[in-house]
Image (tube, rainbow, N blue to C red):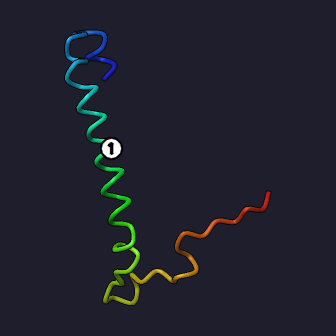
Amino acid sequence: MMISALAAPPLLLFTIPLTLVDMSSALIIDTVMLPADLAITPSDPKLHTPRPMVCRYDYKI
């Protein structure tokens, strides 16, 4: 993006809207698919993530 801004400013008319559409669609799709990704459990026990490890954050300082 920086190279196109320095070398050919008219390319910004194409790259900025394309970047915004790409980022917003990825955010929406990732948000919609998150429950399905968490619900799917792999058949191989080695690949199974224990539930206490999913979306856990320790707030201690």
Residue 2 point in image, percent of width and height: 34, 19
Looking at the image, residue 52 sits to the left or right of residue 48; the answer is: right
For the C terminus, the image quarter is bottom right
Relative to residue 36, is residue 33 depicted above or below?
Answer: above
The quarter holding residue 39 reads: bottom left
Q: Amino acid at mark 1?
A: Ser
Looking at the image, residue 8 sits to the left or right of residue 43; the answer is: left
Relative to residue 47, is residue 6 depicted above or below?
Answer: above
Task: Single out the residue that lies furthest toward the right.
Answer: 61
Which residue occupies 39% across, 90% down? Answer: 45
Looking at the image, residue 60 sits to the left or right of residue 5; the answer is: right
Name the residue that disc number 1 marks: 24
Which residue occupies 73% across, 62% down? Answer: 59
Label 1 Cα crowd, 10 Å radius (few <14 / some 14-19 / many 20+): few
Residue 46 point in image, percent of width and height: 40, 85
Residue 17 point in image, percent of width and height: 25, 29
- Report the number of numbered marks: 1
Residue 9 point in image, percent of width and height: 25, 10
Which residue occupies 34% across, 63% down? Answer: 32
For the N terminus, the image quarter is top left
Relative to residue 43, is residue 8 depicted above or below?
Answer: above
The quarter holding residue 18 reads: top left
Callout 1: SS = helix
Relative to residue 2, is residue 42 depicted above or below?
Answer: below
Which residue occupies 30% across, 57% down? Answer: 29
